[in-house]
Structures are given as C-alpha cells and as structure tokens.
C-alpha cells in the first residue's frame, strides 16, 4: 500500500475518481432523460472522433480536437499560474475574449501578419489581467468578482469592436481565409497536416502550447520567481515577511495569466477554424473549461496537457450525440460535475493517506507482536 | 410632458425590478457569508431557482390559476434554490472543500443542468429540443396576479416580496438569538463553539437560507423578462452583481437595499436608454449602457473594498480541532 503514499499516484488516482464519477453522473442524467439510447449516447461522447467510420476521417477529427485543445490548455495554464499564487483567475474567460477581439480586429481591419495579431492578443489579455491584479493588490477587490465583471465588459467590447469587421448579412466576422485576414493565419505544420488527412487548421499552435506548458512547469518548479509565487500562495504574510514583493508578484502573476489566456485566443481564432459571432450573449466557455482542466490536471502544468485533451475530447464528443433526444450540453454538465468533485480532492487524498497509515500501523503492530510470540513459543519448548 | 413622464416611469419600474432581484440575492449572500461560507455559487442557485419556478409554471399553466399558482411557483423556486445550495453545504461545510472552486462549479453546473433539463422537457413535450421554456400562458396570468395598479406603471408584487424579505432579514439577523449566533459563526467560530453553538448547524442554516433567497431572486429575474426565457443565457451575471451589491452594502441588510437601488438603476439604463430622449441625444453606443453596471461595480468595489467589513472567518472551513 506504499504506492498510495506517492503524491503523483495520489493526484492521478483522485483525478481518475473524479472523471469516473463525473461520467457516471452524466450517464445517470442521460438515463433519466431517456433510458433507451443513454448507453449509446455516453459511449458516443467518450468515443468522440472514433465515431467516424474511416481511419482518415478519424485522424482528421482527432486533429480538430487537438486544435481546440491548444487554447483550452492555455486557459488552464492561465488559471493554474494564478492559482499557484493563491489567486483564482476566473477572469481567464474575459482575458480570452478580449484576446479574440484584439487578434481578429487587427487581422481583419489592418491585415496585420500573424505574429503581430498574436502579440496584440497577448497584450490585450495581459492588460485585462493587469486590471484585476491592480484592483486586488491596491484596492483589495476580490479577484473573482472583478474577474467576472471584466468578463462581461470584455464580451460587450468584443461584440462592439468586431461588428466593424463583420459580414454584412450575418452576425459572424469575416472569414480569416479571405483576402483581408489571410496574413493572420498561423503557419501550418506541412507534412504533419498530411497525417491528419490534410486538416488545415492544425498550426504551430499545437506544439507551441505543449512547449509553453513545459515552460510553465520549469518556471514554477525551477526558478526563484516561481518559488516566490508559490510561497506567496502558501502564506501571503510569511512571504511578505521574508522580503518578497507580494503586491508586485500578484500583479505580475495576473499579467502573465492574462497573457496566456490571450495567447489561447490567438491560437484558436488565428487557425481560422471559427468566426466570432457578434451577437454572442456570453463569453466563450473556454476560460471556464480551463478551470476544470486545471483542477483535473492535479494543478500540475504537465497534468493539464492531458486533462485539457480529455475535457476537449468529451466536449467534441458531446456534439455527436443524438440531439433529438439529448442536448450537447451534457458534456458541459459532466465537466462541471468534475470541477465540483475536484473540490473533494483534498478529502480523497486525506483518506488515501489515512488508509495507508492505518495499514502501515497494522503491519508494524504485527511485526512487533511476532517476535514476542516466537519468544513465547521458545519458552514453552 | 406626459410623454416625458412616461419615459421615466419605465426607468423607475425597471430600476425597482432589478433592484428587487439584486437585493434578494445579495441578502442571500449576506446570510451565507455571515455564517462563514462564501457563496460564489449564487449565479447557479438563481438559475436553478428560476428553473424550478418556471417548470412549476409550465406544468401547472392550464390547471391552476391566480393566487395558488403564484404561491406554488414561488415555493418551487425557493425549494429548488435550497436543494441546490445543499451541494455547497455538503462540500464546503462537511468536506471542507475550497469554497471558490465549489462556487464556480455550481455556477457552471447550474447553467449546464438547466439547459439539459429544459431541452429534455421540450423534446418530450413538443418533440423539439429548444433551450427556451415557453410559459406564456403562465406568465400572463402570473403578471396579472402579480401587478397592482393600472396600465402605465406596472407595480410588481416582487417588489413587495423583496421588501418583506428585507425586513425579515433585518429582524432575523439582528433581533433573534439565531441570527446573532449565525453571525458569531462567521466572526469567530471557535468562540461560538465554546459557548455551545453548533457551528456546522449554523453554517448549514446560512447556506440554505442563501439558497432560498437566491432561488427567489432567480424566478424574480426571469419574470422581469419576456414570456420565454432562454436558459442557456443564464442570469447574465446577476449573481455576481449581487455579490458586488453585498460588498458595497458592507454585509448589512439595509445598506444592501440602498446599494441594490443604485446598481438596479444602472442596469435599468441598458434596457430603456433608447426611449429616454435625454440619453438618446447623447448618442452613445448602446454597448456603453450594457457595460455600465459592470463598470460601475468595479469602480465602486475599488473604493469600498479597502475598509471591508467582511465577516472575519468567511471562507475558512471550520475545524473543531483548531482553537
């Protein structure tokens, strides 16, 4: 039972428990809605791209899931980075949204090249993070509430600004593949795209996202800055007492978190896979799913790579289920149940520790009583 | 002159309706935080409360009418809010989970669950999965039994309910043994426990009461809208605006009421700015009015959060072993 003591094993096991319970609850909900077909629906949801009959199509849609995983990973890194400093960056959704605004507007209005548009998205996201950070550090405003307010502000700004570059007959912005936005498309991966059946939306975003996840891990675990951030997260006053600039660090953290979310927006929209709908009534769910991915990934940058992929996998899978019987939001329901269950992770880990300690204690007791028994036996003989 | 007046009665009417919603939900947050639990899930609780009320209206629309319908709808909203807030209670009080994570999860779950349920109901009833619940019949009878006075000024019964609930909140919090004990649990739970108050019970009470207020606020919010409500829209951040109202109101019920009026006014502007000649002459884009409540709340929070009167032990799970 020693294996339960290992922190990594504990994190992995508790995430798996959350996933299994989350999917189970989703299945029960499907059963209640319509008992026949529930099994098929949950399997479709979990199969996602395996739903397609041919191998080529499967690879193509696997690619599409990867394209959407990249921005999700960035949002979840954004949440994770802030969480390590003890800040809950629910504003990632708004930072992502304003990133969409910046990159699509510069792409479609000024025809800027992709790297400039990407930079604009990063700066816009960072700016929104900065506002939250300043409000937190200097005005003591709860970052969750200011984040939510900025989410709505970002949504309305984005809708208004992108209306300037919208198709005249639809609520959508111009396609990036058109004459104006062509330069803003992220470079594709050439031969690798061929493997994904020529899926042209797979860009440098996918490998870069993974590299950034590793970079975040290095920053948090191997640098002085990362150590300071984590120290502030563990105990703000102790960190301050030790001479760390807690206010500056809080702002810097949120700037970086905002930049990561903004970059995610660029990764997604500059692949040209989707146009922005200028009548949107809520911020994209990417930022909120990022929260789920963060906690499901055990608050580890490498873990979030896998959790982001899994969550995107079931989200895409949700679009394949029979919409006459069930709604695609079932996958949102499952991921929100998973976040809820992630709240219990501490309890699960605590229980695992208890179990292993109890077992250890029993073993020691047995060992301690053994020689005594032997002695007793020896005495009789 | 008459036209001039009409423009402003509409503004006043919307202000009062939105203020009622914000006040109800903020009072809910107030109960929960005074007991020591931060309830970030109010947005989700509102959605589920609204869903409960709307479903009740939807299924009863031909069977019951008038007053019993109103009572049943309100009860359904309150009960759904209470039941949903129990999820927060279990996780945060008994299992000591992080209150921010659980609150966020409840918000996301509320929106997703409401959409799934409404679509399921619609495909069962009409064979078409739609995310809006049409309760036109229900609403018309509801509004007529819910409005006082004549055509010009729609005086909504919800405003009366909100005022009654405000008075109840003030009395319960400040004039009863229960309320004072509840507040003690939010300030110093160990001290409260040492004189024999059950902190767990008090926190549960705080959370469940916040569920009741939140559910009531939810049904009130969707009733202010049109005859149908798209559940995938949620409640447009009203749960969070209410938290801002609560903080601005310094966790005190009567100040919350005043704060709610201020925020309600800015929210109402985004609904009626086109019909008020003074504002339409300014020629500002309507987006500004949509953003106004959120911008105002940010500014207000920036100036009021510094000397916060927040309950001292809020957000910290109660541990019996800690003294």
Image (spheres, helix red, strand yellow):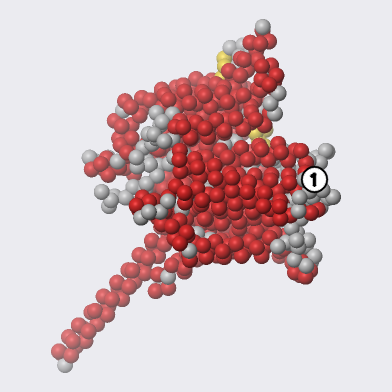
Asked if residue A196 shows in the view, the reply is no
The outermost residue toward the bottom is A381
The chain letter under disc 1 is A
Name the residue nearer the viewer: A284 or B160. Answer: A284
Residue B263 x/y as whole percent: 53, 27
Q: Quadrant of the C terminus of chain A?
A: bottom left
- Which residue is at a point 47% across and 51% down the rendered structure image? A249
Name the residue nearer the viewer: A136 or A203. Answer: A136
- Which residue is at a point 33% across and 69% down the rendered structure image? A357
Q: Quadrant of the N terminus of chain A?
A: bottom left
Along the horizontal axis of the image, is B123 left or right of B252?
right
Along the horizontal axis of the image, is A362 left or right of B154?
left
Along the horizontal axis of the image, is A231 left or right of A275?
left
The outermost residue toward the top is B1
Along the horizontal axis of the image, is A252 left or right of A359?
right
- Which residue is at a point 81% across and 53% down the rendered structure image? A182
Q: Which residue does the numbered mark 1 point to in the structure image?
A: A174
Asked if residue A143 shows in the view, the reply is yes
Q: Secondary structure at mark 1?
A: loop
Question: Is A85 rendered above or below residue A282?
Answer: below
Residue A201 x/y as whole percent: 75, 59
Name the residue nearer the viewer: A313 or A264. Answer: A264
Name the residue nearer the viewer: A279 or B115. Answer: A279
Question: Is A137 rendered above or below residue B147?
Answer: below
Q: Quadrant of residue A10?
A: bottom left
Residue B118 x/y as whole percent: 63, 41
């Amino acid at each position: 039972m020693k294996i339960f003591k290992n922190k990594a094993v504990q994190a992995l096991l508790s995430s798996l428990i959350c996933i299994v319970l989350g999917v189970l609850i989703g299945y029960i909900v499907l059963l209640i809605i319509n008992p026949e077909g529930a099994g098929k629906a949950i399997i479709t949801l979990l199969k996602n791209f395996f739903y397609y009959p041919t191998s080529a199509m499967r690879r193509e849609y696997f690619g599409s899931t990867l394209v959407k995983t990249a921005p999700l990973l960035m949002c979840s890194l954004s949440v994770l980075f802030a969480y390590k400093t003890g800040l809950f960056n629910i504003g990632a959704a708004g930072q992502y949204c304003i990133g969409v605004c910046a990159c699509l507007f510069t792409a479609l209005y000024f025809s800027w090249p992709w790297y400039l548009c990407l930079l604009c998205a990063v700066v816009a996201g960072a700016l929104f993070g900065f506002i939250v950070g300043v409000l937190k550090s200097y005005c003591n405003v709860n970052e969750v509430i200011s984040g939510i307010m900025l989410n709505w502000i970002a949504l309305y700004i984005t809708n208004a600004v992108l209306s300037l570059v919208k198709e005249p007959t639809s609520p959508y912005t111009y396609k990036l593949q058109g004459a104006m936005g062509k330069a803003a498309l992220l470079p594709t991966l050439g031969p690798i795209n061929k493997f994904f059946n020529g899926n042209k939306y797979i860009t440098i975003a996918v490998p870069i996202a993974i590299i950034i996840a590793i970079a975040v891990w290095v920053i948090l675990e191997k640098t002085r800055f990362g150590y300071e951030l984590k120290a502030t997260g563990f105990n703000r006053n102790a960190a301050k007492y030790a001479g760390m600039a807690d206010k500056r660090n809080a702002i810097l953290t949120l700037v970086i978190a905002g930049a990561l979310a903004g970059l995610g927006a660029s990764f997604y929209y500059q692949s040209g896979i989707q146009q922005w709908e200028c009548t949107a009534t809520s911020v994209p769910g990417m930022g909120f799913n990022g929260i789920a991915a963060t906690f499901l990934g055990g608050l580890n940058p490498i873990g979030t790579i896998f959790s982001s992929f899994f969550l995107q996998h079931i989200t895409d899978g949700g679009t394949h289920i029979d919409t006459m019987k069930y709604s695609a939001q079932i996958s949102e329901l499952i991921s929100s149940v998973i976040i809820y269950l992630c709240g219990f992770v501490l309890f699960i880990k605590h229980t695992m520790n208890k179990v292993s300690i109890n077992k250890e204690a029993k073993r020691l007791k047995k060992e301690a009583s053994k020689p005594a028994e032997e002695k007793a036996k020896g005495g009789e003989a | 002159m008459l036209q001039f007046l009409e423009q402003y009665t509409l503004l006043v009417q919307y202000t009062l309706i939105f203020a009622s919603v914000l006040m109800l939900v903020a009072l809910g947050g107030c109960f929960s935080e005074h007991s020591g639990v931060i309830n970030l899930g109010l947005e989700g609780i509102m959605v589920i409360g609204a869903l409960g009320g709307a479903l009740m209206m939807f299924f009863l629309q031909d069977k019951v009418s008038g007053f019993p319908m109103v009572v049943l709808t309100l009860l359904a909203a309150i009960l759904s809010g209470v039941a949903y807030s129990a999820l927060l209670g279990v996780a945060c009080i008994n299992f000591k989970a992080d209150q921010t994570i659980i609150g966020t999860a409840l918000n996301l779950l509320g929106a997703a669950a409401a959409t799934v349920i409404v679509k399921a109901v619609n495909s069962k009833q009409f064979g078409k999965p739609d995310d809006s619940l049409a309760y036109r019949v229900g609403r018309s009878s509801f509004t007529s039994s819910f409005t006082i006075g004549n055509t010009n000024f729609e005086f909504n019964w919800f405003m009366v309910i909100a005022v009654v609930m405000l008075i109840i909140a003030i009395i319960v919090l400040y004039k009863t043994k229960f309320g004072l004990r509840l507040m003690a649990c939010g300030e110093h739970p160990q001290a409260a426990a040492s004189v024999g108050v059950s902190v767990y019970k008090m926190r549960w009470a705080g959370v469940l009461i916040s569920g009741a207020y939140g559910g009531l606020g939810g049904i009130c919010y969707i009733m202010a809208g049109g005859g149908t409500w798209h559940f995938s829209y949620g409640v447009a951040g009203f749960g969070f605006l209410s938290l801002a109202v609560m903080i601005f109101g310094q966790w005190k019920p009567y100040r919350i009421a005043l704060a709610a009026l201020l925020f309600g006014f800015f929210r109402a502007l985004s609904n009626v700015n086109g019909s008020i000649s003074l504002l339409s002459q300014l020629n500002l884009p309507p987006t500004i009015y949509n953003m106004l409540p959120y911008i105002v709340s940010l500014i207000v929070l920036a100036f009021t959060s510094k000397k916060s009167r927040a309950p001292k032990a809020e957000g910290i799970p109660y541990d019996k072993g800690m003294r």
